[in-house]
Image (cartoon, rainbow, N blue to C red):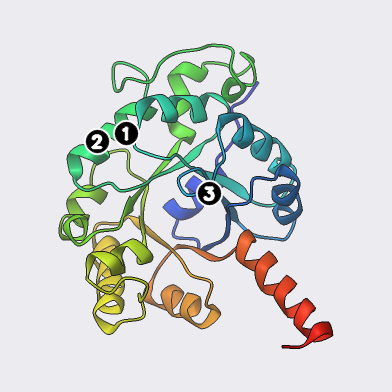
Amino acid sequence: MDMPRNAFKHAIANGQVQIGLWCSLCSNITTEIVSHSGFDWLLLDTEHSPNEVPDILAHLQAAQAGTASCVVRPAWNDIVLIKRYLDIGAQTLLIPFVQNPDEAQRAVEATRYPPKGIRGITGSGRASRYGRVTNYLKNASSEICLLVQVETREALKQIEDIASVDGIDGVFIGPNDLSASFGHIGNWGHPEVQDALKDAVTRLKKVGKAAGILTANEEEAKRFLEWGYTFVAVGADLGLLAKHADALAKRFKGG
C-alpha cells in the first residue's frame, strides 16, 4: 500500500497559493463541515486551543474526505508531542515560537527517524495505515511537511538561517506575537509591523522557502498574497461562528 501523498507539501514547494482556515473549535463535526468548503488547508490548533492528541485524531479522520489538507500545530517544539501527532497521521506540522536555527534543527530531527533524527519508531500506527504502507519507515520523511513559526523580533533577524535549515518546508509569520514583540501589541496594522511582514516574505522568497500568515481581514489577505505569501489562512472557525451569530441576533433584536 502506498503512503498518502501530502498535497499541501508539494503545492507550496511548487509555489502554488494555498488558502486556509484556522480551526480552534474542539469539534470534529465543525472540522468535517469546513473541510468540504473548498479550502486548501485547515490549521488544527493545540497551542491556543484545548485540543489534545485524541481530539486531533478525530479532526484528521473527519477531514479525510474533504478538499483540505490538515496542518497540526503542536503546543510546543516538543519531541514527544511531535512524535504523537506524526504517529496518528498528521503529515504537516506547524511548530510555534522557533527562535533560531538550532530550534529549527531540533524540530526537523523530531520528525525524522534515525540516523537523521530522533523520532521514535512504531510500525503499526495510523501514519503507516496500521502497518500496511510499504517501506514507511524509510520513506516517511518524503511526505512530511515541516513549518516553523517566526513570531518575534529576535527570530525575524535570523529568518534566512531558520528557513535554510534542511528539512524546513516553510515559515509562518505570527503577526499578533510579532506586533507585541515590536511594542505594538494588538496592532499588527502598525506601519512598523506591516513593513516587517513585507520584509519577511521578501527575504523568504530569496532563500526559496514558502511564507505563510493568518488574517481575518479580506483586504489584508489579498495584500499578503500580492506580497508573495504562499499559504494564507483567511479566517478562523471561531471567528466565523461568533461574527455570524452576532450579526443574526442583531438583525432580529437590534442594539
Label 2 is placed on what type of residue? Answer: Gln
Q: Quadrant of residue 114?
A: top left
Say whether residue 223 is left or right of residue 218. Answer: left
Give whichever of discs 2 and 3 has the lower sequence position.
3
Residue 170 vertical placement versus 118 (above, below):
below
The Cα–Cα distance between marks 2 and 3, rounded to whole angstroms, is 21 Å
- Image coords of residue 17 (percent x, y): 50, 64
In the orientation shown, which residue stands out farthest toward the bottom? Answer: 255
Mark 3, secondary structure of its residue:
helix
Q: Which of the 4 image quarters holds residue 113?
A: top left
Amino acid at dot 3 = Phe
- In the displayed structure, 217 sits above or below 57; it is below
Q: Residues within 10 Å of mark 2 (few under 14, many from 20)?
A: some
Mark 2 or mark 3, whichever is nearer to me: 2
Q: Pick whichever, 50 or 94, lies toward us.
A: 50
Tell which residue pokes out farthest to the right in this image: 252
User: How far is mark 3 from mark 1, CA to CA?
Assistant: 18 Å
| Along the line of sight, the residue nearer the viewer: 171 or 13 | 171
Q: CA distance from mark 1 to mark 2?
A: 5 Å
Where is residue 40 shown, x and y percent of the image? 60, 56
Q: Position of residue 237 (x, y in %)?
A: 64, 60
* Amino acid type at image mark 1: Val
Which residue corresponds to the image point at 45% horizontal and 73% vertical from the top-left?
225
**Are discs 1 and 2 less than 8 Å apart at CB?**
yes
- Residue lying at 44% horizontally and 63% vertically, measured from the top left: 230
Residue 198 drawn at (x, y percent): 30, 74
Q: Earlier in the sequence, mark 3 or mark 1?
A: 3
- In this figure, which residue is indicated by the disc labeled 3? 8
Residue at 42%, 40% (x, y): give it. Answer: 75
Residue 108 is labelled as 1
* Residue under numbered circle 2: 105
